[in-house]
Image: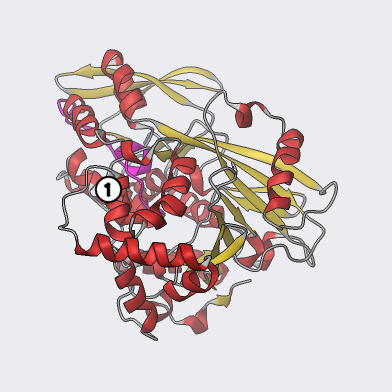
Amino acid sequence: MLGGGPAGLSAAWELACGGARVLVVEREDDTGGLCRTHVRDGYRFDMGGHRFITADRELLDRVVALAGKDLLLAERTSEVALLGKRFKYPLEPRDLLEKLPPQLAVRALASFLRQRLRPRKAPKSFEDWATQRFGRVLYELFLGPYTEKVWGVAPSQLSPEWAPQRISFRNLSEVARTLLRRRSNNPQRTYAKTFLYPRLGMGQLFTRVREAAEGAGAEVLCGSTVAGFEVEGGRVVAARLNTPQGPARVACDWVLSTIPLPSLVGLVDPSLAASLGQRLPFRPVRFLNLGLRAAKVLPTTWRYVGEGGLRAGRLQEPNKRSLAMAPSGRSSLMVEIPYALGDEIDGLSDRDLLARIRRELEALEVPLEDDPPVVFSVRAPEAYPVHMRDATSARDAAFARLAPLENLRSFGRQGSFRFVFSDASMRMGLVAASGVLSERLATNHELSRVQSRRTLTEVASLVNAGTLAPGG
C-alpha cells in the first residue's frame, strides 16, 4: 500500500481484516495525509477545514463504531469576507441584497436574471459553469477572484468537472428555494450544517483507522518512498523502497497506490510523467497555525477570504469544532494560504509569514495579539488537484499507461486526481481492498468514479445524537 492517508489507511484496514498481509509505505513521519492533526503545547491544528459527513450509511456506522465516545456532533458556521463586510455562507440572496451596495446588488440581480434567460450550453471551463449559474457580476465579484487565488490558475483554464462536487447548488434560484424551507430531508452536501468530528482533531479518526489496521496485522513504514518496481509478465512482483534503514526490496502480489498520479506514472514511464506533471498539477497550501491567549477570535467556525488581493484563502478557529483543540480558556487561529513552489509565501520563515499575514488580518478586522505563544506552519505540497481543462484526457492517458500492470491500482484524492472529500477517499480504499480480497478488483477508472454523493441525509438524522458528545 503506497500512501498512508485516508484512502490508503482504509484499504489497509479492510485488507488486514480480510486476512491479507499488508505493508503501508508512507513518505511522511506519520500517517493521515491531509487529515493529520499537529499538536504544539496543548494546541491542535488540522490541515484544513475537515468535517465528516457522508450519505454512505455503512461507512458512517464503521466510523461511529471506531471513534466511539470521542466522536462529537458539531454544527457548521461560516462566512465570506468581501468588500469590507461579512456575508453568510452558504450565500443567501437576502443577505447579499442587504449588504451589497444598492447599485451593485441591482446589477448582480439583473446579471443573474439575464443569464437565466439565455440558452444553457455545456460549460467548457469553470468560468462558464459559474457565470451560467450565478451571473457575470457575482462571478467577477467573488467566485472568479476567489477561485483564481485558491487554484493559482485563471478560471477560464479550469475544468468545470470539480465544481458540482464542491459547489452543490446550481444557481441562486435553487439557493433561495432551499433556504426558504425550514427542513430538508435530502439537503445538498455543501449545505449540511451538522457534521461529525473527532474530539482531538481529524487526525484522531485516522489514528484509529491505523490502529485497527495494525491490530489486524498490517505493518506501517513511515519516512519511506518507493523507488521503482520489478515487473514480470504484466505484473508488479516487487517494489524497491527507500527507507530510514536504507534500500529495501519487498515482494508483492498487489500494489495499491494513493501517491500523486504523476508520481506513480513516473515509476513506470518517466517521459510520460514529465508531461503529465504539467497537465495534472497540484496546488500547494501552507497552513499558518497560531496558538493564542485569547478565548475567542472569530464569530464563526471559518471565514472564506473573498478579497482577491489578499493571499489568505480561509481562516479557521479550531475550537469551534471541539473545545479540546486548545487549552482551557484559550483559542487558536489557522490561516490557509495557497502558494506556488518558490514564491514569496514559500520562502518566508514562520515569523515573517506571520508578519505578512498580520496585515491582512488587520484589514479583515480579525484581532491578533502580539507575540502569540505558538507560531508554526505546515506545508501540503499536493493539497489540491488542479483540474485544468484537459485534466480528463490527461488522467485517461495516465490510466492507460498503468493498465497493462494488472495488479497495480491508483485511487484517493491524489491517486485518482479528483478533488474528493474524505468519505469518498475512504470508500475508494474500501472498494479497492474488497476487490483484492474477492479477486474482482475495479479498474482505475472505476475507482476514480467513487465519489461523495451530492445529496445526503443530515448526520443528526442518521446517528443517535444522544450517544455523541456535543461539539465545542
Quadrant (top left/top right/bottom left/bottom right) for the C terminus: bottom right
Query: How many numbered dots are placed on residues in this image?
Result: 1
Q: Residue at 32% across / 53% down in the picture?
A: 130
Q: Is residue 84 left or right of residue 59?
A: right
Q: Is residue 321 left or right of residue 20?
A: right
Q: Residue at 23% across / 30% down in the picture?
A: 394
* Residue 340 visible, this angle: yes
- Bin the neighbour count of mark 1 within 10 Å (Cα to Cα): few under 14, some 14-19, many 20 and up: many
Residue on which disc 1 sits: 128
| 416 within the magenta span | yes
Which type of secondary structure does the marked residue at label 1 adopt?
Answer: helix
User: What colour scheme has been applied to the protein in the rendered image?
Assistant: secondary structure
Q: Residue at 42% across / 78% down in the picture?
A: 463
Q: Is residue 261 left or right of residue 221?
A: left
What x and y, as percent, mark residue 56? 31, 65
Foreground pick, 273 / 297: 297
Foreground pick, 357 / 165: 357
What x and y, as percent, mark residue 119? 15, 58
- Report the magenta residues as a range: 403-421
The answer to which image quadrant residue 368 occupies is bottom right
